[in-house]
Image: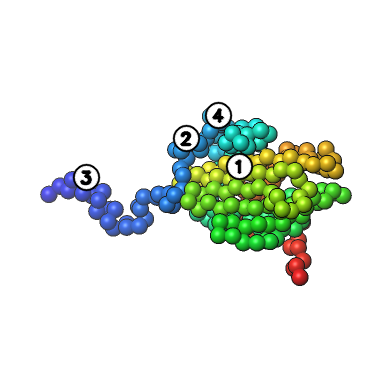
Amino acid sequence: MKIPGFAVLWSAVILMGPALAFSAPPPGAPTEKDPAAYKGLSAQDIERMKKGEIVIVKDLGFGEDTSKGMIQAALILNAPIDKIFALQTQDWRQTEYVPYLNEMFVVQKFPDGNLDEEHIKILFVNINIRVRWYHHPENFSFNWNLDPAFKNDLKRLDGFWKFYYIDDNHTLARYGTVTEFGFGIPTWAQDFLTRRDLPEALHNNKLWYESNGSWRKPGYKPAPARK
């Protein structure tokens, strides 16, 4: 007696069990089918991202209140979205991959994120800031801004990460930042922080994510323990 084709297929599924389980995004995770996922990107941009490149999108707004001067970027990460999100909640570890960031530590923890102090040094220029990080596990995103109670060396710093599920091993990441400088910071240092060093910083971030947090920037040295 012939066994119908669908019966053979179903038998294989039963025998193989979890090996043929269908993948699905974690609860709350947006997917690449979300209209915002590839917003502002051309077909050529998407192809470049699939080849491992980071696409910089200048002055593309993230909400009307923060659109002025915002620089955005998009990249595809070869890592699961839940692992990436878990790593990014450890925002105090940014010294492991962010260029020129010498020291970073948690000042205060909150239910929805952290208040971190950052010490940046570019040659003889020192920049000290406190940044409030907000973690949003309900939609796999983060945003941050300066602590107004601290005497920051920057006039403004806002930004975001937003992650989109592609499959169990690939994640689309969208990034944006706005930086405004006060008096006393040389123009060349401003250029380094806002544009020239952004591709390197995001490249380092990608390596860190994809190594599950084990990669370190060249010359990295842990800061001495604070007393």
Asked if disc 1 and disc 2 are in contact, CB closer than 8 Å, the reply is no
Question: Mark 2 and mark 4: span between their CA atoms?
Answer: 14 Å
Q: Which residue is mark 2?
A: 35
Q: Amino acid at mark 4?
A: Ser
Q: Amino acid at mark 1?
A: Tyr
Disc 3 or disc 1, which is closer to the eye?
1
Q: Judge by depth and name the residue closer to the eye, 78 or 158.
A: 158
Label 4 crowd (10 A; few <14 / some 14-19 / many >=20): few
Determine whether the residue tagged by mark 3 lies in a helix, strand or loop: helix
Q: Which mark is residue 151?
A: none
Determine whether the residue tagged by mark 1 lies in a helix, strand or loop: strand
Q: Residue at x 68, y 40 (%)?
A: 178
The answer to whether residue 184 is left or right of residue 61 is right
Residue 52: image location, x then y, percent: 59, 41
3 in relation to 86, above or below: above
The answer to whether residue 151 is left or right of residue 141 is right
Q: Which mark is residue 42?
A: 4
Q: Which residue is mark 1?
A: 175
Q: Earlier in the sequence, mark 1 or mark 4?
A: 4
Asked if disc 1 and disc 4 are in contact, CB closer than 8 Å, the reply is no
Question: Mark 1 and mark 4: span between their CA atoms?
Answer: 17 Å
